[in-house]
Amino acid sequence: MLGSNDSTLSRRTFVKGSTLAGLGAAALGSGALFGCSPKAEAPKDEAADAKVTGASTVGAEETITWGHCAINCPGRCSLKFHVQDDEVVWVDTYTSSDAGFDDPQPRACLRGRSYRRWMNSPDRLNYPMKRVGKRGEGKWEQISWEEAIETSMTKLKEVIEKYGNEAVYVPYATGVSATTSRPFNRVLNLVGGYLNYYNSYSTAQISCITPYMYGAKGSGGSSFSAARDSALILIFGSSPTETRQGGLTTHYDWVSLREKTGAKIYMIDPRMNDSIMGHSDQWLPINPGTDAALIAGIAHELIANDMVDLDFLHTYCVGYDEETMPESYRGKNMSYRAYIMGEGYDMVEKTPEWAAKITGIPADRIRSLAQEIGTTKPLYVNQGWGPQRRSNGEWTAWSIMTLPCLVGQVGLPGTSNGTREARNAPSLGSLPKGDNPVKASIPCFLFTDAIDHGPEMTSKNAGVKGVDQLSTGIKYMINYAGNCLTNQHSDINKAHEVLADESKCEFILGIDTVLCDSLMYADVILPDLFRFEQTSQISTGSDTGYMITGTACTTPKFERKTAYEMAELMADKLGVKDQFTEGKTEDDWIKSIYETSREKDEKLPTWDEAVEMGVYTRDYAPVISMKKFRDDPVANALETPSGKIEIFSEKLLQFTEGWELTDGDTLPGMDTLPPIPAYIPEWYGVETTTDEYPLVLNGFHYRGRIHSSWGFMPELKEVNPQEAWINPADAASRNIKQGDTVQVKNEFGSIELLAKVTPRTLPGVVAVSQGAWYDGDRKGGVDKGGSINTLTTQRPSPLSKGNPQHTNICQVAKA
């Protein structure tokens, strides 16, 4: 069993040796494991062994291989690995030497360029291990691959025999993206399937509500390049500079737009995010979770001053006023206009004064903004995913999408439809999963409920699809490249409690490159290879799309394997190897998938050309959202029941009839969910703070991590410390100064981190970046890693049953 507490091995000793001592001890103490100790860095004298001089090693031949970042970041950035003696000596990225000087270049950010440190980290998983203590204790013992597969597959067969395939689950995880990155689903489908999930932790609410308004397939927004023709640009809750900073995705497009547009820009956000920096006059601060109230106040001003585009609303939309309501709902004051003017629903007129009390934006400013919106064309309205990741997120997203419709600014040059900006990329296929015989599906955010009380979950109380009610709880999980069991899930303390109970989920198989918090609950752990340590392919992009084809930068070290190799071993043990492989290696599959993609896209290079060039780029024309529909709404009808934009959704009203709702899920006086884009106060928000918890707590994405990826690396933590942003007024009343250690707490837990005293967040609002690694006792004590999800609720949003992790209240005090 692992037991040494020495994590000061040099990188070369660690790579060449066979001991697990450093990793084992680190597993027992998260500080040592995740590089918090300064001793985690290799000693300086290792240079004598390697004779490193700058980027080259004297006397050794250097090879360069292309690879890509596979983390859940839209950048999917290109990486060049400089290799000597089968060791990566440094990591470069795409530069002007790889293309023309003025050509767009999908360069990696600091995170991607730090991969060498992650690859060679003393925290890297090297061998299969089994748990020898209680779940969460972090006690492990090295085992053979044979034992790991035998143990895991024997338990899988036992669970299927006892509970059925519905008891097997592959939780939501986004740590690896590539064309063959999800082979375990394929294996499970060959032995009877598994419980499905729908939604994501990123976009549950907006993905759910958009089809009700714009049709079954939804409708993406216009590209940022299309916004160059705009006169007024409104951005709600989005920061491309922080969320999409690498490669050639929307950060690049955002900076380009800023340089080339003559439009006036307003950024509506509770925090002066990094995309606003240098343009503070464009920041329109708003209380978190109140965007729908702002839209309602603007709509009232537009209606009261005859600035709505009635021709557009009557031609292209359903539900704006009585004239456009479905026949069976006319005369009931259920239109959007009736809601705004106080003639229906809650019977409250949504004046700018009403909106000002909720949003914190003065009524006169709401009036002047409405005047600009009503008279300035073209208007481009865009929203990020932050506003929808709330308890009222479906209606917030719907409200923002309604705004451009009110003034007819959809489907024309320089406009958008209020959703997120369009992105383009070469289309690549993926490893076929096969058909899943299990029809039941749950919202991914409710997996802990499915573990705890699965048979109580129904279509009416938990959004179960495919069946009316689950027949069993989750008893077996394969958690691959995911930290959503705990760290990225809500209410970490509650998640710990559920996962620690072995009578509920009986077996957890964990697969990753390092021991993140979610793996602390695995019964068997398997060590993964990075995608750049194997053949791999991926595509992404925006106005410029690109595809990266990578080959293994080094041979596999220790006993690490690819996910496909692991799945093949599982399939062999289960007796379905031939069906799984179809006679192909993983490289064969990657090539086969690519050739199928080429049949649909003749512009793609041959496989050999793709490998040789490493990075293939392609320019795309600006996207104008819903242009065809605007040009001819009959020939290009939307996939809504009416074929039109639905500001009132009869389908939503009928679909949710009879649902079990909780107080605060809907408008006062209603026993159904609102079929129009209304403002619903948050459960934990500006209207529900208390004396005990008087501050609103808002989350955001951070440059130093993508979700929790890179959250353990000391070098990046030094550059990007975990902080609680607090307004100077709130800090002064608590005697808090810049750099003080503070505790942020609420009914769900307490975290400890540094204070960032700044006017970039509103008074009464605290901002904490998501993704920091949990560092607590797993018994409800203070989390000294500062993970915001120690403070978030597991109560899902009412329609999508999605993740509401920006809906929080708290108190802050000096530690």
Image: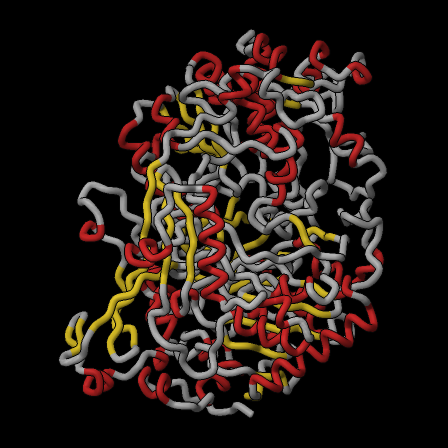
Image height check: is 776 above or below 175?
below
Q: Residue 644 location in percent, x, y?
A: 64, 20
Total marks shown come to 0
Task: Tell me the residue at 70%/75% (across/down).
Answer: 507
Image height check: is 161 above or below 634?
below
- Is residue 814 rendered to the left or right of residue 756? right
Q: Residue 425 location in percent, x, y?
A: 42, 43
Task: Tell me the residue at 75%/69% (across/down).
Answer: 475
Can residue 611 be seen at all in this image of the molecule?
yes
- Is residue 546 rendered to the left or right of residue 586? left
Q: Which colour scheme is used?
A: secondary structure
Can residue 274 be seen at all in this image of the molecule?
no
Q: Residue 198 location in percent, x, y?
A: 66, 50
Image height check: is 476 above or below 804?
below
Hey, which quadrant is residue 436 in on the image? bottom right
- Is residue 516 rendered to the left or right of residue 267? right
Task: Tell me the residue at 82%/68% (across/down).
Answer: 163
Image height check: is 213 above or below 182?
above
Q: Residue 439 location in percent, x, y?
A: 76, 53
- Is residue 774 rendered to the left or right of residue 60? right
The N terminus, quarter of image: bottom right
Q: Nearer the viewer, residue 439 or 314?
A: 439
Task: Tell me the residue at 46%/20% (across/down).
Answer: 369
